[in-house]
Amino acid sequence: MNTTRPRHANAVPLIEVLRDGVVESVHWAHVVISNAQGHRILTWGDPDRTGPGRGCLTPFQALPIFLDQIDETRAITPLEMAIILGSHAGQEVHQEAVRSLLRRVFLTPDHLILRQPKGAPSRLAHRCSGKHAAMIVHTRVSGNDVGCYAHPEAPVHHRILTELLKLTRLIRSQVPLVVEDCGVPVACLSLERMAHLYAVLAAPSIAGGHAASALGRMVSAWSTHPECLEGEGLFDTEIVRVTSGQILARTGPSGMICAALKDQKLGVAIKVESSVSGLARRLLARVLGHLGVFSEATEELLSKLATCGSRSFSGPFEKNLRFQLPD
């Protein structure tokens, strides 16, 4: 039985995987829930656990589009707005949304630096094409060189980081940047800051002024077109539908997931140290069920959806989990 404590010593053992009733492995994790004022409501593990935000930060990497009202001046549709907020599955609706968005600034898929996925008709099918489209559209409208949009020193990335620092109340030296697999920089933040960011998404008015309006339009697109967040039958899409738009979640790689709880005006950040995204989704469903955010039936449905599309956690043992949540 594997119960080895992970290198990050402040993690807590929240998930057991069973085989015929015997504990086969233990998964250590962290959970942080914050309100929009930045106050922690619940902490299991280490709220200062810091790492690349990756897919969980994708909506905030798109924020300049909304802050500069490019969504309004270029008549970007809610569907096109939604495609820049997630990591899509490359379905036809996703590819067409990215293609349409690029056309609004007279660009083509060839301007994206992304690799074409194997067997796909174009680089539009890459799961990050929506995020890249947001960056290149902002670069074009701002009059900068679209050929350099992915460079860490490109103006669009300075702008993204500036707005992120405002929302997180941090200074530049506190936020390292790393380069994602898709070739663009992303910030490293603590789980506490990630939970706070998602709490602000849940209560955009707290940001005030133009930021409140921008975040509100972002949340509206997210709620209206969840099919663009991930894809039909997949967790990030279906959690919006199952909860009638009250929970917005983004799954990142390496066992991370964040969620905005609109009714409660709270944000959640979860990191599973074993880096299994399917487990992170299951843990989110269990935590929200444990807190009474939704019914047992909704929790069960979300638990079934949690492993959809997850190659790292599936098969006959996906139901054989036991959660050890602190009181």
Image (cartoon, rainbow, N blue to C red):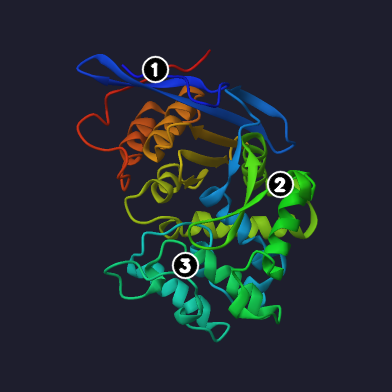
Which residue is disc 2 drawn over? 175
Packing grade of label 1 (10 A; few <14, some 14-19, many >=20) is few
303 vs 216, nearest the viewer = 303
Packing grade of label 2 (10 A; few <14, some 14-19, many >=20) is many
Mark 2 or mark 3: whose residue is earlier in sequence: 3
Which residue is disc 1 drawn over? 3
| Horizontal side, residue 62 vs residue 6: left or right | right
Residue 198, position in %: x, y?
Answer: 62, 43
Residue 111 seen in the current view: yes
Q: Which kind of residue does numbered mark 3 sit on?
A: Ser
| Residue 129, label in figure | 3
Outermost bottom residue: 106
The secondary element bearing badge 1 is classed as: loop
Residue 219 seen in the current view: no
| Horizontal side, residue 111 vs residue 74: left or right | left
State the separation of the CA atoms marked 1 and 2. Answer: 32 Å
The secondary element bearing badge 2 is classed as: loop
Mark 1 or mark 2: whose residue is earlier in sequence: 1
| Horizontal side, residue 269 vs residue 177: left or right | left
Q: Which kind of residue does numbered mark 2 sit on?
A: Val
Packing grade of label 3 (10 A; few <14, some 14-19, many >=20) is many
The residue sitting at 32% across, 50% down in the picture is 233
Query: Which corner quadrant of the image does residue 264 belong to?
Result: top right
